[in-house]
Amino acid sequence: MSDKHDVKLLRSFSYKLKIARAVELASSGALENAENLIMNKGFGPQTIEENDLLARIYVQQGRYYEAQKIWSAVLNVDPQNESFRNALDSLDKVLAELKNRRKVKFIAVNIGLIIITIISLNLLIK
């Protein structure tokens, strides 16, 4: 075997080991460590697989919009990938539900403030 082949084989093995380690870290809850590994010393994810893993880490961290950006970009590169499409569709549903919850909370808080104001005014008038 040639030295070039050996180097290529070693790089492939190192990459697979890195991905496996990042998955293991994320699965055990060490999300920041997994993210740091995928970020390639500040250069960011280099492959579609790394981007997908980073987006999944972001979802677990509650960083939904960052995950959405990544999956959207990855779909531009690989538009036929059903896994990414399904992940993005699921995330869109989560974001819509969060938006609805915020609306309900906003309305409930405002109704509460109105009630408190009415009660306070009634007490002041008496």
Image (spheres, rainbow, N blue to C red):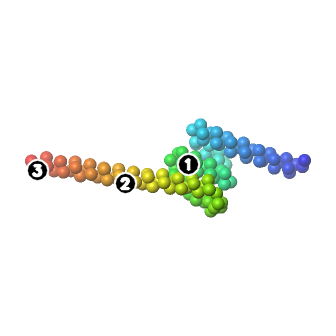
In screen coordinates, is 9 left or right of 116? Answer: right
Point out which mark residue 80 bears.
none
Q: Identity of the amino acid at label 1?
A: Tyr
In screen coordinates, is 32 left or right of 100? Answer: right
* Residue at image location 54% in from the left, 48% down from the top: 59
* Residue at image location 86% in from the left, 51% down from the top: 4
Q: Identity of the amino acid at label 3?
A: Ile
- The residue that mark 3 highlights is 125
Q: Identity of the amino acid at label 2?
A: Lys
Callout 3: helix, strand or loop?
helix
* Residue at image location 60% in from the left, 55% down from the top: 84
Across the whole image, how many numbered discs are drawn on residues? 3
Badge 2: few (under 14), some or many (20 or more) residues near its Cα, within 10 Å? few
Query: In the rendered structure, which disc, 3 or 2, sits on the residue that comes first in sequence?
Result: 2
User: Quadrant of the rendered structure where residue 17 is?
Assistant: top right
Label 3 and label 2: CA atoms lie apart by: 33 Å
Q: Give coordinates of residue 57: x percent, y percent.
A: 58, 46
Label 2 and label 1: CA atoms lie apart by: 24 Å
Which of the pair 36/65 is nearer the observer? 65
> Can the viewer see residue 32 in this picture?
yes
- Front label number (1 vs 3): 1
Asked whether disc 3 touches disc 2, contact meaning CB atoms under 8 Å apart, the reply is: no
Q: Give coordinates of residue 96: x percent, y percent.
A: 45, 55
Q: Give coordinates of residue 124: x percent, y percent.
A: 13, 48
- The residue that mark 2 highlights is 103
> Can the viewer see residue 43 in this picture?
no
- The residue that mark 1 highlights is 58
Callout 1: helix, strand or loop?
helix
Callout 2: helix, strand or loop?
helix
